[in-house]
Image (cartoon, rainbow, N blue to C red):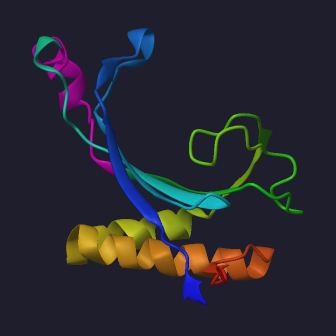
Amino acid sequence: MRVQRLDRKIEIYPGKNLGGNGFQGAEVLFILRSDMAAITFGVLTDWLPKELQESSRIIQSMGIRPRALDLTLHFAVPTLTAEQNKHPNCPYLQAGSICHSMTESLQSREQLRDVLLAKGTAGLWLEMERRYYEAARIMQIPTQIKKVQL
């Protein structure tokens, strides 16, 4: 048996004007996934599209700062802690899967931010994989592929 392959993906969503709520910088989302589960971690930046940069100078002086977002676990199988967070058509799981998600603590968010700052994306992917396999073990999600006899 071998460990199943985990896909890595980074998505970047542009910064935007939130109307009366100010501005939000671009979001960088790190996604680690298999067919049965995924883990996502985001970072909000202070990057804004050029057309918003000038109008946001006053707002920026009030403090748009980069910050870590939640670390979220997405499962295709129900869990006790994730049952209340059930979503159809999760973009991180196999098509048609119902997502049972749960968000880790603020402490996890800060720990991942520190890993990203100290070790870059290579270190972040390793830490996300460690957390993925730990969650999969606790939730009893298969992480190995059985060799098929032909």
What residue do we see at 28% from left, 32% from top?
25
Q: Nearer the viewer, residue 44 or 73?
A: 73
Q: Is residue 112 above or below residue 95?
A: below
Q: What's the magenta region?
A: 52-67
What residue do we see at 63% from left, 79% from top?
145
Q: Nearer the viewer, residue 139 or 45?
A: 139
Please check the rendered image and state whether residue 64 is part of the magenta-colored stretch, yes or no.
yes
- Residue 103: x, y in percent? 65, 56
What residue do we see at 20% from left, 29% from top?
60
Would residue 95 appear left or right of 56 to someone viewing this image? right
Q: Nearer the viewer, residue 18 or 127?
A: 127
Residue 117 in view of the camera? no
- Residue 10: x, y in percent? 33, 49
Residue 63 in view of the camera? yes
Please check the rendered image and state whether residue 133 is part of the magenta-colored stretch, yes or no.
no
- Residue 80: x, y in percent? 89, 63
| Screen quadrant of the N terminus | bottom right
Q: Nearer the viewer, residue 114 or 95?
A: 95
What residue do we see at 57% from left, 73% from top?
132
Would residue 122 appear left or right of 129 to someone viewing this image? left
| Screen quadrant of the C terminus | bottom right
- Residue 120: x, y in percent? 22, 70
